[in-house]
Image (cartoon, rainbow, N blue to C red):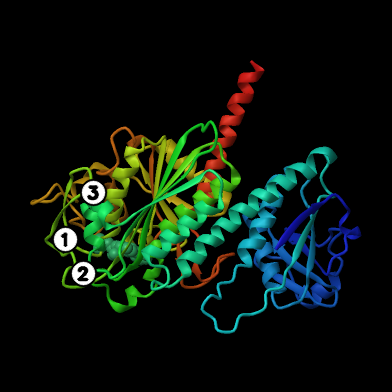
């Protein structure tokens, strides 16, 4: 899909179709030209309401306000309305007089996220119409600034939406397709296609050399061998070092603590953290953020077999911490344990891990929301705020010393499950804390994306299946860091 901005008046732009936002049920706006038809259709203009008038070549969508996530939602509904048409060009006007960047970004993100289709496994694929979206900037005051900043915003939004859709493609791919080896290939492809990006891939021998005993144990029973993936994006004069760690379980059967059948379906999504971390690296490099960005992925399959790791085993992680296995289905934390030790050794300024870690997190915050954990409340809130701007739902969860006691073990340093079933998302986060180096703890965030990463039913502009959870919030978060640094330097110059 091609997206362009234009300073032309909307009425002067030639296009096959026009999208019109009805804001706050107000139909008096100059672009609402079909009031009678809308009345016949009983179109009120509520959020999530749309009306396609084929003879007029217009789609009307309701929003309560021009809040960015409502704009995203509206665009996705409009795209859905014309999905089966042959329209090649669509136009939409600007409704706000300032901040072209925020508004145009929301339009682009809503359009691209909302029109994502996953048809890799369909024998008959629906023909994809190549469309162009033209955004008219006629409402903006500042004639000089607007086109430039709007074009830049479009470019950024395309990168962010494409990265999200890229993560969806990986997660939606089935386990026998997207094996650890294939995931490593995807990472290598990302590195090959981008400047300043390098990729290192390690196999079982590497895990052994690195003393990653927890990761290796989880991987052992699968015919698909594990891969440790480390990507690095290094721009010139990086201002800080960010490390993202992703749980890459290409399948989670539960292992010997086997999942019941109904819980096993959809466990191809247990690689969502890895897909997000890979997409974030891709997006960061394309956005040319002024930071060194690393992505570490622990990719393997949790399966059963004669050589499977078992409840009662004691594993030794890379940092020497011993772990009593009491449930082989709590495997993500074992893989992440070793990856977090490795990530800590890189001495990051910021460390973020992302994982479909616990069903308990879904119970705690609902299936649409990411749980944000960590020791530093300012840092947690910076991610919370970035998530909100990006349109992802998130909620912070608090660590506490009493929950920490629940992962004690009689036989080893810690147990891989808590002694109580309450607070399972937090006890999993506290388990990971044992593998984050002391110097990094204050700058570490753990994102449990078990709920939003994979949807049984579509909601908002997310289709059923993978959602790319974590990608947008992290890329917005990185951009916020960039703005902060830029402002700081500007102020310096003023002095
Ligand atoms: N991959 C699952 C968590 C999960 C659950 C992801 C639902 C997505 C949707 C994880 O490995 C797991 O099985 N966790 C267990 C932990 C328990 C054994 C302490 C869980 O949540 O039940
Ligand atoms: Zn599991
Ligand atoms: Zn899992």
* Ligand 1 image-quadrant field: bottom left
Q: Residue at x 83, y 48 (%)?
A: 139
Report helix, strand or loop for mark 2: loop
Mark 1 touches mark 3? (CB < 8 Å): no
Image position of 346 with respect to 447: above or below: above
Describe residue 108's horizontal placement relative to residue 185 as left or right.
right
Measure the C-alpha gap from mark 2 to mark 1.
9 Å
Judging by the rendered image, the residue that carries numbered circle 2 is 257
What mark, if any, has residue 209 been given in the picture? 3
Q: Give the mark, 2 or 3, whose residue is nearer the N terminus.
A: 3
Task: Return the residue nearer the eye: 217 or 450.
Answer: 217
Camera-nearest residue between 142 and 251: 251
Q: Secondary structure at mark 1?
A: loop
Quadrant where the image shows the N terminus: bottom right
Question: Does the residue tagged 2 have its C-beta within 8 Å of any atom of ligand 1?
Answer: yes
Looking at marks 1 and 3 on the same chain, the residue that comes earlier in the sequence is marked by: 3
> Residue placed at 77% from the left, 42% from the top?
148
Q: Residue at x 70, y 51 (%)?
A: 154
Q: Secondary structure at mark 3?
A: helix
In this rendering, the label closer to the viewer, 1 or 3: 3
Instruction: Tell me the residue that label 1 is attached to.
Output: 326
How many marks the image carries: the answer is 3
Which residue is most to the bottom? 124
- In this rendering, is residue 69 above or below 48? above
The image quarter containing residue 425 is bottom left
């Amino acid at each position: 899909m091609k997206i362009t901005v234009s300073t032309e008046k909307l009425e002067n732009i030639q296009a096959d179709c026009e999208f019109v936002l009805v804001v706050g049920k107000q139909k008096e706006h100059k672009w609402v030209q079909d009031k009678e038809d809308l009345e016949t259709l009983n179109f009120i203009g509520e959020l999530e309401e749309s009306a396609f008038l084929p003879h007029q070549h217009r789609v009307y969508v309701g929003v309560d306000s021009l809040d960015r996530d409502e704009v995203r939602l509206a665009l996705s509904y409009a795209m859905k309305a014309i999905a089966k048409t042959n329209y090649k060009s669509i136009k939409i006007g600007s409704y706000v007089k300032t901040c072209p960047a925020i508004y145009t970004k929301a339009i682009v993100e809503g359009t691209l996220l909302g029109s994502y289709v996953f048809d890799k496994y369909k024998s008959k694929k629906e023909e994809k119409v190549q469309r162009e979206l033209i955004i008219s900037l006629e409402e903006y005051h500042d004639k000089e600034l607007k086109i430039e900043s709007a074009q830049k915003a479009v470019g950024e939004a395309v990168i962010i939406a494409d990265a999200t859709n890229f993560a969806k493609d990986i997660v939606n791919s089935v386990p026998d397709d997207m094996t650890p080896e294939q995931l490593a290939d995807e990472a290598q492809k990302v590195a090959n296609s981008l400047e300043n990006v390098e990729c290192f891939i390690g196999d079982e021998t590497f895990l052994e050399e690195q003393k990653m005993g927890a990761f290796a144990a989880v991987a052992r029973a699968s015919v698909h061998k594990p891969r440790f993936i480390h990507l690095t994006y290094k721009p010139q004069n990086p201002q800080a070092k960010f490390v993202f760690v992703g749980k890459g379980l290409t399948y989670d059967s539960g292992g010997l603590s086997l999942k019941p059948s109904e819980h096993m379906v959809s466990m191809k999504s247990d690689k969502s953290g890895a897909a997000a971390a890979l997409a974030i690296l891709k997006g960061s490099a394309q956005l040319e953020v002024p930071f060194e960005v690393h992505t570490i992925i622990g990719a393997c399959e949790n399966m059963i077999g004669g050589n499977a790791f078992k409840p009662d085993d004691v594993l030794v992680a890379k940092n020497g911490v011993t772990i009593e296995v009491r449930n082989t289905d709590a495997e993500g934390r074992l893989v992440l344990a070793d990856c977090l030790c490795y990530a800590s050794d890189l001495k990051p300024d910021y460390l973020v891990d992302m994982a479909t870690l616990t069903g308990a997190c879904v119970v705690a915050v609902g299936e649409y929301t990411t749980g944000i954990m960590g020791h530093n409340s300012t840092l947690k809130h910076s991610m919370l705020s970035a998530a909100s701007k990006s349109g992802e739902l998130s909620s912070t969860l608090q660590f506490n010393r009493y929950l920490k006691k629940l992962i004690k073990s009689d036989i080893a340093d810690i147990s891989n499950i808590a002694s109580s079933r309450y607070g399972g998302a937090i006890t999993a986060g506290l388990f990971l804390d044992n593998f984050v180096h002391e110097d990094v703890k204050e700058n570490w965030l753990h994102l449990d994306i078990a709920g939003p990463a994979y949807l049984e039913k579509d909601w908002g502009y997310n289709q059923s299946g993978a959602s790319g959870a974590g990608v947008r919030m992290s890329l917005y978060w990185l951009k916020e860091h960039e703005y902060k640094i830029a402002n700081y330097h500007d102020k310096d110059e003023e002095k």
